[in-house]
Amino acid sequence: MKTYAIATIPGDGIGKEVIPAGQQVLEQLAATSDRFRFDFENFDWGGDYYRAHGVMMPADGLDALLDKDAILFGSAGDPDIPDHITLWGLRLKICQGLDQYANVRPTRVLPGIDAPLKRCGPKDLDWVIVRENSEGEYSGVGGRVHQGHPIETATDVSIMTRAGVERILRHAFRLAASRPRKQLTVITKSNAQRHAMVMWDEIAAEVAREFPDVRWDKELVDAATARMVNRPATLDTIVATNLHADILSDLAAALAGSLGIAPTGNIDPERRYPSMFEPIHGSAFDIMGKGLANPIGTFWSVVMLLEHLGEDEAAARVMQAIEHVTANPALHTRDLGGQAGTATVTQAVCDYLAQTA
Ligand code: ATP
Ligand code: MG
């Protein structure tokens, strides 16, 4: 029997509702498994911690995560605290500190979900977006001078290193090779950004030689948005820079039907450090504390967490339970047009897991 050490960081807003729901699902799995148990440690970092201590997480916080097998994260964001503090002080601090350089987002139209593209069912939209998560446009390098003057100047420097680009492209090719269609689209803006983006194209061609089984093509990011809407079935695995993939993956989540469903993994493919799994939605203060949050994005993140641990069978069971729930409109939360609450959906997933154990 294995025991996996899992850190839970609910963070802010509805993170405090969906992360306990995710833990409940993992506990339900463990209750009937003779393979594994979970040892959870909860960290109360986020906006409330900031109000009490002046920081989003303690200075030695990363050390407390190092011996974990995985991290389940909720959301960081608080209407009373500036975004750059909530974001850089917690989530990005963990992503960068643990060098989780690959942000991976599966997107699929689940059964029973009313996706905005009417011609688009589960077979037409099945993507994984790989986002560079450690450098690029969000490197944090830049500055402002002459504030308030006519000559005021500001820069955000996008940093792309050969090592950084090579490792994310290699991860994307590897992921593409592991999927049935073995297809990768490399997205850049190399017609207008003529230095780093041209380097991406060159490195993509180099790395592609290591993966002769993968069919790959290049697309400019603007054209890619149109292709996602007009020809979704022509895409499978997608890789792009930090900024480009940030935008594309929100578009992808919306096309799949709801922000409340989509999961993401912040992965260290080399497994030097624990990886972190989280729903893509934010803290959603408008619905917090009301039991209305859709927990499916967290459950799908749990699926990714289990896959990362190598527990593929358990992961597949949770995915099946999710699809069982989404297929039933009576179990849809308000964001999906239904009436069900967080607790009802969570219980339905746990019941299904208990019945199919
Ligand atoms: P943040 O500032 O942390 O990004 P936010 O308030 O912008 O948080 P988002 O997560 O970006 O919230 O979501 C936008 C809106 O979508 C929310 O205000 C909420 O109404 C809805 N929403 C998001 N996630 C969920 C969910 N899991 N269940 C139900 N509704 C959701
Ligand atoms: Mg938001």
Image (cartoon, rainbow, N blue to C red):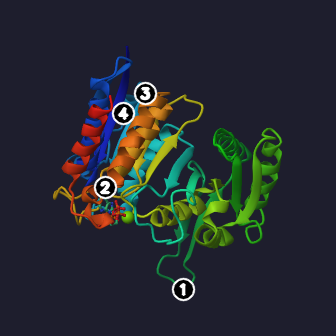
Asked which quadrant contains residue 138, the reply is: bottom right
Rounded to the nearest whole Å, what is the CA distance between mark 2 and mark 4? 45 Å
Q: Is mark 2 within 8 Å of ligand 1?
A: no
**Which quadrant of the rendered structure holds the C terminus?**
top left
Residue at horizontal 35 percent and vertical 17 percent from the top: 34
**Which quadrant of the rendered structure holds the N terminus?**
top left
Comparing labels 1 and 4, the label whose residue is closer to the camera:
4
What type is the residue that disc 1 sits on?
A: Pro
Residue under circle 4?
Answer: 60
Residue at horizontal 55 percent and vertical 36 percent from the top: 268
Comparing labels 3 and 4, the label whose residue is closer to the camera:
3
Label 3 or label 2, whichever comes before in sequence order? 3
Quarter for ligand 2? Answer: bottom left
Comparing labels 1 and 3, the label whose residue is closer to the camera:
3
Rounded to the nearest whole Å, what is the CA distance between mark 2 and mark 1? 58 Å
Q: Furthest-bottom residue in view?
A: 150
Residue at horizontal 75 percent and vertical 60 percent from the top: 218
Numbered label attached to residue 328:
2
Residue at horizontal 63 percent and vertical 61 percent from the top: 233
Q: For mark 4, give the secondary structure.
A: loop
Category of crowding for the residue at label 4, using alpha-carbon neighbours closer than 10 angstroms: few (below 14), some (14–19), many (at least 20): few
Q: For mark 2, give the secondary structure.
A: loop
Rounded to the nearest whole Å, what is the CA distance between mark 1 and mark 3? 52 Å
Q: Is residue 44 visible in the rendered structure shown here?
A: no
What type is the residue that disc 2 sits on?
A: Asn
Residues tagged 1 and 4 counted as in contact (Cβ below 8 A): no
Q: For mark 3, give the secondary structure.
A: loop
Residue under circle 3?
Answer: 69
Residue under circle 1?
Answer: 150
Comparing labels 2 and 1, the label whose residue is closer to the camera:
2
